[in-house]
């Protein structure tokens, strides 16, 4: 994507900034560059320094939607993450941190002047038109990279959650890319539980359009959670990294729900590290009981047909009671 030139560039001068990290980190930076553009009217040229040059493609696709930001490709490949003030000072452009408030936390330089976080940036992207009038609940199967910061839901947990959501009231959509979970298991999950299977079916931009069309979105921490919250989609975020909370803007906290994966004690941390060393990923997530997630969704949408839901509960517990009595 190219920026305006000649007389246009005189009206909209370009400022150079740098960022580091992955897609989620860059989205936090985008929100701040949006605030910078609103304050100053200036266009931005963004340089990325990272160990993950393969992310240039989706990051570039995202910034193609933003007319006032040019994302420079290829990114600058570095041997390790930018993680110190000294690293930031060696960059050719002012560095924008991954924290919403611009505080470098003693490890990074503070954000440049006029770089202020915009929690609800306008993105020129229409939500997907979905035919059903029922409540639309999206589940992001996983985020991150296998061998790195992968975080993915247990298929059994998704099955349990779907059984709490009445089919007459709620459509469930499953998002993700192929190659991590068994395709046959995912197809079986969706077929048996009447879930719309979009795993491996969408390109990057279509994925974003579908997320914008959701009424409620369930996702591990990362880009998908940041994007959904920024577009005012009510979101349940399951986080593993407790430092992630420091990246969440107060406006995002008001309307969304944050749940820990529950890996805080020493035993779980040791077992997770061993699991990750063997499997190249964290264990699958079963963050909270599905009925609790159901209650969270129900509390956010008072227009769900209460009588339908009460009958659903009654039938569910009656079946369980009859099963135990046999």
Image (tube, helix red, strand yellow):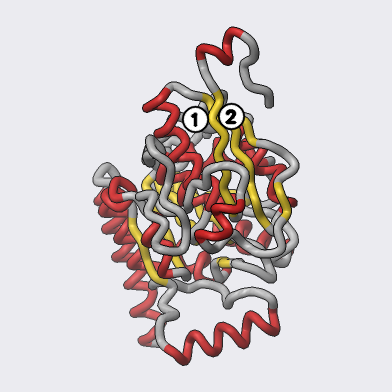
Identify whether 270 is placed above or below 259. Answer: below
Which image quadrant for residue 143? bottom right
Q: Which element carries disc 1, helix, strand or loop?
A: loop
Q: Position of residue 49 (x, y in %)?
A: 65, 51
Q: Residue at x 50, y 40 (%)?
A: 30
Query: The C terminus appears in which quarter of the rendering?
Result: bottom left
In this orientation, does residue 135 appear? no
Q: Position of residue 41 (x, y in %)?
A: 44, 21
Q: Nearer the viewer, residue 76 or 26?
A: 76
Q: Residue at x 48, y 73 (%)?
A: 286
Question: Mark 1 near mark 2, Cβ–Cβ under 8 Å?
Answer: yes
Identify whether 243 is placed above or below 96. Answer: below
Q: Which element carries disc 2, helix, strand or loop?
A: loop
Q: Position of residue 260 (x, y in %)?
A: 39, 70
* Residue annotated with mark 2: 65
Few, some or many residues within 10 Å of mark 2 (<14, 14–19, 20+): some
* Residue annotated with mark 1: 123
């Amino acid at each position: 994507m190219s920026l305006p030139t000649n007389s246009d560039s005189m009206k909209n001068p370009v400022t150079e900034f740098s960022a580091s990290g992955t897609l989620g980190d860059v989205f936090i930076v985008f929100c701040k560059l949006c605030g910078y553009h609103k304050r100053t009217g200036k266009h931005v040229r963004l340089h990325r320094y990272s160990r993950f040059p393969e992310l240039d493609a989706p990051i570039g696709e995202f910034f193609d939607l933003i007319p006032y930001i040019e994302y420079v490709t290829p990114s600058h490949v570095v041997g390790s993450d930018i993680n110190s003030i000294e690293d930031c000072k060696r960059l050719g452009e002012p560095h924008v941190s991954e924290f919403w408030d611009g505080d470098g936390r003693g490890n990074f330089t503070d954000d440049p002047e006029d770089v202020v976080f915009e929690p609800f940036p306008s993105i020129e992207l229409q939500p997907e038109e979905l035919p059903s009038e029922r409540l639309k609940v999206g589940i992001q199967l996983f985020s991150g990279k296998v061998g790195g910061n992968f975080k993915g839901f247990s298929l059994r947990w998704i099955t349990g959650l779907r059984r709490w959501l009445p089919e007459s009231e709620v459509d469930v959509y499953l998002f993700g890319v192929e190659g991590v979970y068994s395709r046959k298991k995912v197809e079986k999950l969706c077929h048996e539980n009447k879930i719309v299977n979009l795993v491996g079916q969408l390109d990057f931009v279509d994925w974003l359009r579908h997320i914008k069309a959701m009424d409620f979105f369930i996702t591990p921490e990362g880009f998908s959670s940041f994007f959904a919250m920024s577009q005012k989609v009510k979101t349940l975020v399951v986080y593993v990294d407790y430092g992630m909370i420091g990246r969440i803007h107060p406006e995002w906290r008001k309307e969304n729900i944050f749940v820990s994966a529950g890996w805080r004690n020493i035993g779980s941390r040791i077992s997770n590290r061993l699991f990750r060393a063997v499997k190249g990923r964290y264990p699958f997530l079963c963050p909270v009981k599905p009925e609790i997630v159901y209650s969270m969704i129900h509390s956010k949408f008072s227009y769900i047909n209460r009588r339908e839901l009460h009958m659903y509960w009654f039938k569910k517990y009656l079946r369980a009671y009859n099963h135990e009595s046999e």
